[in-house]
Structures are given as C-alpha cells and as structure tokens.
Image (cartoon, rainbow, N blue to C red):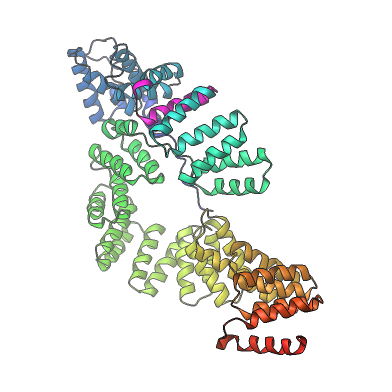
Amino acid sequence: MTAKPILLLAIGTAVVIAAVAYRFTSNQAESQPRPFPIVKGLPLPPPENSLNENLESELLKRYQLAKQTPSNRKPARELAQLYHANGFLNQATEIYRDQLENDLLLEYPEFPYLAANAFLDTGDQPTAISILQRLAPKSNYAPLFLKLGDVHLKNSEISQARVAYHKCLELESQSVHALIGLARCSIQAKNWTEALGELSRAAEIDDSMATLHSLLAEVYQQRGEANLKAKAQKRAYLEKEYFEAADPWLESLYIHFSYDPYQLMVAAEIAREADRIDLCKQYLSRAEQIAPNNANVLVEKGRTLLSSQKPKDALRAFEKATAQPNPHEAAYIGLAQATASTGKPKQAIELLVAAETQYPKSAELLSALGTLYLSQQKLDSALDAFKRAHSLNPRNPQANRNLGTLLLARGDKSGLAYTENYLVRQPDDSEVALFTARNLLEKQGNPQAAAALLQRSYDSLARPSNELRQLLASSYHQLSNLQASQKRLAPAIASLEQSLTIWPDNYEALANLGMINAQLGNHEKAESYLLQFTEAQPQDPNGWLNLGKVYLIAKRLPDAISAWKNGLSQARSQGTANAFAELEALLDRFDN
C-alpha cells in the first residue's frame, strides 16, 4: 500500500513546530549580556547561538528601531512577526500583548489576527478568543470565523461555533472546512440527520478529504446504515489526510518573515499535498531568498519547476544545487531529468553515468539512468541499470517496478515476480497493475491471478479508472468462463456476479448468468438476468432467444413464443444469422 501523504497539519502549527523543534532548546540556554536596555513590551532577541546570521541581523535592526522610535509601531509589529514566524512564541506574544493594549485592533486587523494565532499556539485560548471576538463584528475575513468556530467547538461551545461557521460560509460559500465544522457540531448534539446533510454538502464541493469520510462513517453507524458505513470507512483510508484551509494572512507571515529554510520546505510540502502549487512556489522562493546556496532548497525548487513544465528554470536550479559542496545525488538526478526535458537525452545520460562514479551505491541514480536509457530505446543498457539498482536495494519498490515491467515487455515472464512484489507494496499504481494483468491474461492464461491482482489495485483507489474497472470485470468474466468449462458452476456464478458489481454494463455477464442459472434449474434468477439483458440490449436476438428457452423450460410457452417473436423483429446482420435461424426454427415448431 502506498504510504499516505504526510499529515497535513495547520500551516501555522506545523511550521511553528518545525521552528521550535530546531531552536527552542538553545533558546533556553543562558543568554550573554547584550548592549540593549530592557524595554517594556520589547523582549530581547534569543541568544546568538540559536539564530542564523540573517535572522539575528533582522531582529536586532527592528529591536533598535522599535526602542528608538516607540511612537512608530511598525518596527515593534514586525519584530513580533519575526519572532512568531521563527518559532519564538514567548517573545512574540509579549510584543503582541503590549501592542494590543493600544486600541489599534481594527486599524490593522491582520496584526491582531496573527496575535490570536500565536496565543492559540501557546495554549492561551482566552486571550485568542477575546482578540478574535473583538475583530469579528467588522471583519469580512473568512478564515477568522473558521478559526473562531474551531476554538468554540474545541471548548464544546456549540451554539457559538455554529454562528462562526455560518458566518464563514456567508463569506466563502464553498468552505468545506466550515461545513465539516458544522457537522462536528451536529454530531456533538447527536443530530445525525443534520450532520449527514452538512457532510453531504461538503462532499459535493470536495470529497477528497479523509476526515469527511471518517465523520460520514460515524454518522452512518449511528443511523444503522452498515453498508454505507463500510464504504465511508474505505474512502477515509484511501483519501488525503485533513489539510488546513487557505489562510493568506498566516501564510504571508511565513513568506515574509521566516528565516528557516527547513521550516519553509515543510510548509511547501504541506501546500503541495493540498494541491496549492502557487503557494508551494512562494514558500520555496522565500527559502531560496534566505538560503540561496542551500542544496536541499534548490533541489526542491527544481522538482517543483520540473513538475510545472518549466524545464529550463528547473535546469538552472539543479545546476546551482550540484555546484554546492557535497550535493546529494538527488541534485544530479534532477539535473539529468531537466536536461532530458530540454531535448538533450544523450547529455542527460552522460551526466548520470559520470555521477555514478561519485555515488556508486545509489539505487535511485541507477533507476533514473535506466529510465533515460529506456526513453532512448536502449533496452539492454536500461535492463542492466535496473538490475544493478535492484541488486543494491531488492526491497526498493521502484527497482522492482522498473525491472519487472521491462522484463515483461521483452517477453520474459520472470518479470511477473518483480511487478507482483511491487504491487503488494503499492497496489494503487494502476498503470503497472493493468500492464501486469494483461500479461497474466494474454500471455499466461491466468484470469484468477489477474483478477486477484486487479482487485487489490481497485480496492486501494478512491477513484478507480474506467480502464481498470473494465479489465477487472473482464478478468472475472474470463475466470467464470474457465470455471464453467470445468463444470464449477457455483464459482462461475460468483465470478460473474463480481464482474457485474465492478462493471454493471457488462451485458454479456448478464446473459451468461441467465444461462448458467437456467442449467441449474434456477428459472426465476435466469429470467431476471435475461430480462435485464433484453432491456439493456433489445437489438440482440440472442437475448430473446435465450429468454424464450428459459420460459420453455418453465413450461410458459406463450411467453416463450412472445420472446422469440421479439427477437425476430430485430434488425438482421451477418453476425446474428445463426440466432435468427434458430428463432425461426423454434417458432415453426411451437407457434402452430
């Protein structure tokens, strides 16, 4: 099973934790005397050994300005934001508290909103709620009301939470998060019908959040709807983890004031997982601005640009990354991929061949090299690279994927062991699942293995493709044919029924189910399936022919004759000549 995406925590919380984890312990160290007098509301910067040079300089510059010009509140506000964005929450909240003693709350609403977030992060909910409530009457900023609703809900203040969530929806009607908040309120109040309505509205907007389906499962359980509960639980397992709603004011804090490249890369990854690529780029741009020679930042920037179809810009980022001391092999892999994307695949291969001497134990580099060889139809070289990558790391999923698919493409059935091993770990790779299943069906004649493999892939996907659904249904159908030929009619029926569950438009399965049930003497079931077939495919004379036979066996001759006449009334074609001949013969015999 593919590892689920990283837990998408609130941007504010996640990046603060990243910064605090990095610096907080050193922030507790004994500070050296500083040539700055203590000024009320202006805490001293942390000890120098806990700061990078750029942050130290910015903090001290704003500290001096705030101390020298107390009537100008901008330096103090910026100092608070610097502390906040870089994880020094005690210093930040001290300045926030002092600044908010002056009634500037509504003049600069973004500043007190950030202050409320800082107080929430330190656990001071009463102060945070007080600030948010003072801002609320004249605010049209939807995230403020979402935040206020979340705090009230956490405190089990349901009526206040509902008011805040409804106000958020007035400002942003498509807020899935506000609807989920309302549903949580309804669940706490045990109002399952209202909760279901709110969650259904949220799902209509965006049904890709695991939390939504977890709550639906809880509601369905309370309503006694076991089947729907099971489906919701499956979706909860397959979908993305909860991610925070967009919050431009809080996001802007880190884009403008963070001096921690690691913190910014965490925020960029969170934004990428939430499909907010523009925000991801802004975080990476800030990271590069403060750490222009950080190889990890440059590699992440290059990957983002490459995925955004900007290979030339990506190339520059990777070139700069490889120029840094002791770069990771990912920099060379990215450089080669970007080079290939600019139309120079041979040069890209040369880059990785040269890099292999520096990283001889890198399975990732060899896999990338094999992929480049494959793109140039150099199959022997690709196979050699993939085999060496697999020998370095036999458990590596990508190594198994590459080696297995290439072997199968070359007609070597030993590749099945590699792709099947890969799919045990990553069944949601439907491309490999389809490729392997087709080999099992067409080359190995093994529909049972194909169906089992595709079923695992199908179960692992929240939204299986039609191609996957159809091939899975076809695999079960082929398996049923095999079972029927072995006189194993009960398993054949089960396989056909599974085929129909996956692909209800598999009309041939309906016809086969009708005929197998007729052989077993299950006339009612046979009639039901064949009626469904004739309703879906009335132009096919075979359906009417077989339905009439079922009626004949059940001693319902008038119904049989009527069915056969319906069959004869359909348009004739060369492919249906035998069916029409049999229909005419039956009517000649029984319709006197």
Residue 28 showing in the rendered view: no
| Residue sitting farthest toward the right | 555
Q: In which quadrant of the rendered view does residue 311 lie? A: bottom left
**Of the pair 497 and 306, the residue shown nearer to us:** 497
Q: How many marks?
A: 0
Residue 14 image offset from top left, x and y in percent = 41, 34
Q: In which quadrant of the rendered view does residue 58 lie? A: top left
Residue 157 image offset from top left, x and y in percent = 53, 22
Residue 445 image offset from top left, x and y in percent = 60, 77
Q: Is 326 in the magenta?
A: no
Which secondary structure type mostly characterizes the magenta part of the structure?
helix
Q: Is residue 201 left or right of residue 86?
A: right
Residue drawn at (60%, 28%) of the image: 189
Location of the C terminus by quadrant is: bottom right
Give the magenta part as a residue range.
137-157
Residue 364 showing in the rendered view: yes
Residue 43 image offset from top left, x and y in percent = 30, 15
Residue drawn at (30%, 33%) of the image: 252
**Of the pair 66 and 513, the residue shown nearer to us:** 513
**Of the pair 111 and 29, the residue shown nearer to us:** 111
Give the answer, above or below, for where 104 lies relative to 543. above
Give the answer, above or below, for where 385 lies relative to 335. below
Residue drawn at (35%, 74%) of the image: 377
| Residue sitting farthest toward the front | 592
Q: Is residue 585 left or right of residue 385?
A: right
Q: In which quadrant of the rendered view does residue 542 lie? A: bottom right
**Of the pair 419 and 272, the residue shown nearer to us:** 272
Q: Is 149 in the magenta?
A: yes
